[in-house]
Structures are given as structure tokens and as C-alpha cells.
Image: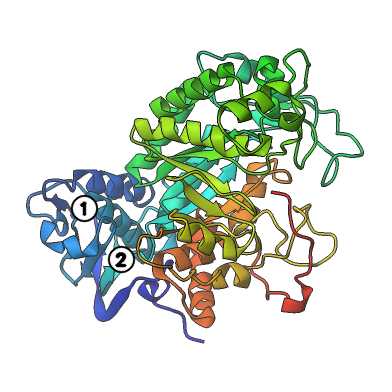
Amino acid sequence: MPALRRDQALLPRPTRLSLRSGHFTLDSGTAVRTTPGAEAAADLLRDLLTPATGLPLPPSPSGDITLAVDPQLRGLGREGYGLTVADRSVLLRAAHPTGLLRGVQTLRQLLPEQALLPAGGARRERWELPCTEITDVPHRPWRGLMIDVARHFHDAATLRRHIDLLALHKLNVLHLHLTDDQGWRMPVAAYPRLTTVGAHRAGTAHGTGGEDGHDGRPHGGAFTRADLTGLVAHAARLGVTVVPEIEMPGHVRAALAAYPHLGNHPDRALDVWTRWGVCDTVLGVHDGVLDFVYAVLDEVMDVFPAPYIHLGGDECPTTEWERSPTARARAAAEGLPGPAGLHGWLLGRAGAHLREHGRHPVAWAETGTALPPGFTAMSWREPAHAAEALSRGHDVVLTHHRTTYLDYAQNDRPGGPPAQPGPVVDLRTVHRGDPDPVTPAPGAGRVLGTQAQLWTEFAPTAADLDRLAYPRLCALADRAWTGPTPWPDFTRRLAAHTRRLNALGVRRHPLTAPPPQAAQTRTAPSA
């Protein structure tokens, strides 16, 4: 099979692409011209290309490469762009500066993969871009990756690198799962024990649950405020939004280990959990808990300017509330039919606090849980739940575990690395994805997009994140930006794209033939 031209090996695939003969040559004399609003994209172009290529790409009113914000292109939306590479000039245009950032990533992919090498790794005098014309608009506005830094802590440098890779693939959301039973990673000034105590556990569970104890090796870590604001700023330069998640009312054992009075048994001393699965300790529902929730969310909103804030909301046992006189009294006072209703009540209070400050609450949607009005739903258990959420008026991000959970095994071969119990999620499964739910009657919610999930019970190292994410995240990126693409077309482009991943040092899973469909028979998860 003949090699693909670089403009035929773009990932994700552009909406429209016309091949032209010839090439544009970048050399030491190449300069960049910008119109007002395009300066940040020009800076990004230099930051990405100059260290590896050695080309300065200085600004010039008569530059060969033009980056322009053109309001007349508003039909391309916020992220769309048009790119024309001719033999003597390059023109990148967009209606919004974010669209230029997406086009800059396409320009990177049009260069040989050596242009992605670390600083100084590929110096040469001349670089060629194939002549082509591209018009590109994303299929969905939400295209993301969730990284769980609670089960295993991953530092800011690791996350910065993943932000860089998200931008290369035109993914625009990094969802950070910052808190859980096994660790609390975000500092909150009013509650310092959340990180001095809640960020450290005595060990990590053996196997998939922890019934056999833990390994006895302490694990811990927390971000500083400067770490998080630095991540947000770095992501913004690349057109990526960092969406924080603070779990509630369940998955809060680490918080209760730090502040027992927030629970349903204020005198009980708890440890940060060393097991996996669902812990039955949940937040109390007294006024002090509401004060805590509001204080935490105020700090979250101060650090993260994202329009969306994730409140968790999944896997919340109600046993403690049912046994608590205080919780039963609260349910009665709020006019709820029983303690189980406190789940929606507490999420509703937290969500209202966010909306009062102009933010949108997000939560995981699961069987039997009707989210409060105004929440964006992440439907992860069954595809049908997305349609249910839409019919109730919720916007939806598709996160079905059988197609987006990248911590599941990539094949059924014995002796592979540990994986979350669940179905096999191979490359083709991610590429195929789930059909978009049918949008119900007018007034229903919207499908915002999709994202992949990296839960980290079995991903303690940065290399593990690479292996789990790539190349499967490439398949999700292609579908999220372009919509469904033919499998042979995707695999041809991916085979060429892996050379870019290799140049960037991504420790990816090897490309192999997908297992037969009949092999995909693992047990459903407890996420």
C-alpha cells in the first residue's frame, strides 16, 4: 500500500480536505503575519515549532504565513478554521481565536514527525508543508479526557504533558477527578487537613477490591494552588478547559478521615480508604456540611474558571442516612419522601450554589438517579440513560463505560497488565463508539459531546496513563471531532499518526488486531 501524504494522515480527519500539488517551504526567512486577535495563535505556533525546528518564525507585516481572525467566517463556529497551504504562502483563518489554535495543531501534523521531537532534536534548514486546502469544524463541542488523580496521584508535570497531547488531537476538555475515598488532592485554605490528612493513605489495595488487604506502602500527594492555576493557564493557551470534579455526597472517605464531623457519625475516626469499590461512608446533611460544600466550591471556582464544575454524585449508599435520626429529620423537614431523597437534595443545594455564581453543575448519571434540574449529565452505565436524561431536559456528555473507559483491558490475552474488571474495550470498540441518542421532543437537552475515562486503580505511573490512553484516545478524538469515520480509513491514518506519537515519546500500547467480538465478556464495573 502506498504511503499516505501527510495531509491524508491527519488525526482527527478534517471535515473537508482538497489535495493540491506542490509544497510550501519553511526556512530561516519564513515569517508570520497576524491580524488583531491572532497573536496568541502565532505565539503558540512558535512555541511548538521553533524549539524542534530551529526556525524563529518572527512576526512581520509581510510574512509568508498569515494567521487571521475573520468575523465573516462565523459559520465555522468557535473552533472551526480554514487552512490554505499554497506553494508561496500559508493562510490560516477562523472566526474566533480558538479556531486558530485548532488550525495550528493541523499545521504541526502537516510537518514531518521530526518537527515534534524535543528541543533541538531535528534541526534542519528547510521544512516542507504539502499544499492542501482544509475547512474543518468539530462534530461536538465537548471532546475530553477524564484523569482520576485521586486513586493514584499524578503530578502537574504529567498532566501538562497530557494537555499538550489533548490539544494535538483537538480534544478540548481535561476533566480532573480530584477527590475520592482514596485521596483528596486539591488544597482548600479553610480546610487544610483535606490535604495534610486526606491526601495520604496507608497502602493500596491488592487486586480488584482489597479484601486481601493492601500492600503496606504509603501513597499520597496533593497539588498546590500554584500547580492548579498553572495547569489552567497552560491549558488555556492551547484551547483546553480544565473541568474539576469534587465528589459528593459519596466517595468522600478521605474528606471524612480529615474532618469526621462532616459525616453521619461525628465521633468516629476513619482512615483514608485503602480499598477499591464503593465505600458506604457518605456526607452528613447537617448545616455544617453545607458550609463545607459551599467553602470548597468557592475555592474551586476561584482556581478553575471553567463554566462547568463536576460534583460527582454517583454510587452513594443511603444506609447511613436511613439509620441517622439527624438525616431522617432533615428529610422530613425538606418534605422528602425518605432519606434516599437526600442525595438529590444535597446535589441540588450544591448545584444551586454553582449556578448563583454563573457556573453549570455536572454529575454522573446512573440507574434510578434523577439529577436535579439544571445539571449536565454524564451517562456512564447504559446508553439508554443518555436518552432518559435528555428527555428530562439535561444536557448530556456521553461516557458509556463499554466504549469510553480506557482503564478496561484492551484485549483478552492472559498475562497482560492489571485492568479494571469490565468488558474488553479495544481500539475498534472506542472507534465505533455508541450511536448518538435520538433527541426527544423540543425543549429536551442537548448532546454536548463525549469523553474518555482513565480511572487509575491500576495506573500508578505516567507510563501506565500513556499505555491506557494511546492509541485508543486517538479513536475517540477522531469520532468526537469528525463524527463516525470508516474503520479502514481510520486505521490507515492511525498507522501514520503513531510516528508522531513515537516522536513525542508516548509510551503507547502496540497496535494489534482487535479481538473477536465474542471475547468481550468481562463483568460490568463499579466505577
Residue drawn 73% across and 54% down?
Answer: 525
Q: Which of 429 and 391 is in front in this view?
A: 391
| Residue at the outermost right position | 212
Which one is earlier in the sequence, the residue at label 2 or at label 1? 1
Amino acid type, residue under disc 2 in the picture: Val
Residue drawn 59% across and 41% down?
Answer: 313
Residue drawn 75% across and 59% down?
Answer: 524
Question: How many numbered marks are there?
Answer: 2
Q: Measured from the top left, where is residue 19 in percent x and y?
A: 28, 80
Q: Which residue lies under the disc numbered 1?
A: 96
Residue 476: in sight, yes or no? yes
Q: Measured from the top left, where is residue 122 in percent x and y?
A: 42, 54
Q: Which residue lies under the disc numbered 2?
A: 137
Residue drawn 77% across and 28% down?
Answer: 323
Left or right: 45 with respect to 12? left
Left or right: 520 with respect to 290? right
